[in-house]
Image (cartoon, rainbow, N blue to C red):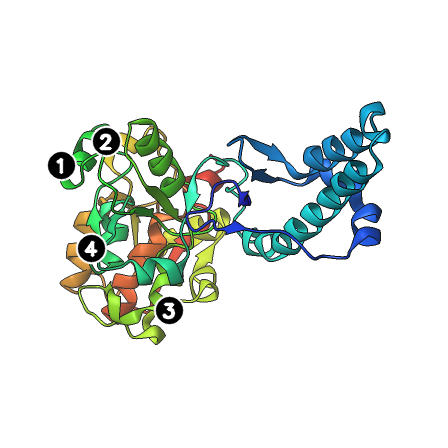
Amino acid sequence: MFLLRRGVHPFTRGIAVSGLNRFLAVRAIAENLDDLPYLIKDGSGVWVNIGQLFHALTERAASTNYKENKTMMKKTLQRAVFTIAGLLTLAVPLMAADEGYPLRKKYPALQYITTTDLKSQYDNAQIVDVRSKIEFNVIHINKSVHLPMSVASFAADLEKIRQRSATTPLALYCNGHSCEKSYEAADLATKAGFKNVFVYDAGIFDWAKANPDKTTLLGKSPVAKEKLIPKTTFTNKCISYDEFKKKAASPNAVVVDIREPVQRDVIPKVAGLRNIPSDRMVELINKGEFKEKQLLILDAVGKQVEWLQYYLEGKGYTNYLFLDKGMLSAKD
C-alpha cells in the first residue's frame, strides 16, 4: 500500500498499485524521475521521492543476491515498474492541479484545501480571513472570522477561537493564488502547534464565484457576481506617475494619499496632496464627498486602491484615477 502526495494534500488517499503493464513508458522517463516533486510512503512510514524508489528497487533487483533468485528478481522489477506507473498516473492530474499556485513550492510542508472540499467541510471547518480590515469589509466568506496576519498576536488570537489540539479543519485564506498571507498564516499556525491546518489558496474570489450564497460583498449576501470588479476595470483606472502629477495640477482635482501616517516615510511632490487614511476615506465616499471632483488616489504599492474601488463603484463615482503601483512608481 502506498500514499502519494504533492507537498502534503489534505485528502491524500491510500492506493494499491497492481496490474499496470506500462514497462516501456516507465523506462522511457525513468531517468528524469528524480526531478519529480512527488513523494510516496509505504509500510515503513518514510516519505521518499518516486524516482529514488524506482532506482532503489531496480538496483536491488540487479544485485548479486537477487541474480541468484530469478523469481524474486522478476517480482521486484515488476513491483518497481507497476508502482511507478501507477503513481505517475495519479501524478498527472495533481501536477495540473498545482498550476496557477506559484507559492506552493515555497511551502511544501503545508496542507491545501480546494474550493470543493472547503464547501463540503463548510459547516464543520473553522475558516479564518487573514487579510486587512478594508479587504475583509469589502468581501469575505460568510462564516469566516477576521484575524489579520499582520497583527503580532495572531497565534494567541487564533487560539481564542480554536484550540491548538482541535481536529476540526482550520482553513486560512486571503486573496488567492499569488497572495502569500494565507501561506504565512498557516505556516505560523502549524509551527505554533495547531493541528489540522489548511491553506485555502484559491482565495476569496474563487470562493465568491463558486459560492455566492456563502459570500458577503459590501455587507450584502448572496453576492451578485456582476458586482465583482474585473481586473481590466481596475487597470483602466491606473495611470503613470507623470500623468498623475499633471492631472493633480488641475483646479478640479482632489489628490489623496490613503496610506496610514506611519507608512508615509516618503512624501511625493504632488500638488495639493492630502493624507486621508483608507478607513476615513471609505467614510467620506459613503457620504458622497468629492463626487463632483477629479479624484486622484495613491497608496503604498497599488494594492489598497483595488479595495477602495469597490466603494467608489458602489456609490456611483466615475471620475477617479489611481497611481499605478502606488508609491513604487514615484520618481521624485
Towards the viewer: 117 or 187: 117
Q: Nearer the viewer, mark 1 or mark 4?
A: 1
Instruction: Give the labeled residue for mark 1.
Output: 160
First reached walking from the N terminus: tag 2 or tag 3: 2
The image quadrant of residue 318 is: bottom left
Amino acid type, mark 1: Lys
User: Considering the numbered disc 2 on the image, is that residue within a helix, a strand or a loop?
Assistant: helix
Q: Label 3: few (<14), some or many (≥20) within 10 Å?
A: some
Residue 101 placement, left or right of 201: right
Asked if marks 3 and 1 touch (Cβ < 8 Å), the reply is no
Instruction: Give the labeled residue for mark 4.
Output: 282
Residue 221 visible in this rendered orientation of the protein: yes
Residue 294 lies, in percent from the top left, at: 32, 61
Q: CA distance from mark 2 to mark 4?
A: 29 Å
Instruction: Give the labeled residue for mark 3.
Output: 210
State whether residue 123 is above or below residue 161: below
Residue at point 62%, 39% (across, down): 37
Q: Nearer the viewer, mark 4 or mark 3?
A: 3
First reached walking from the N terminus: tag 4 or tag 3: 3
State whether residue 282 is above or below residue 215: above
Instruction: Give the labeled residue for mark 2.
Output: 155
Q: CA distance from mark 1 to mark 4?
A: 30 Å
First reached walking from the N terminus: tag 3 or tag 1: 1
Amino acid type, mark 2: Ala
Q: How many marks?
A: 4
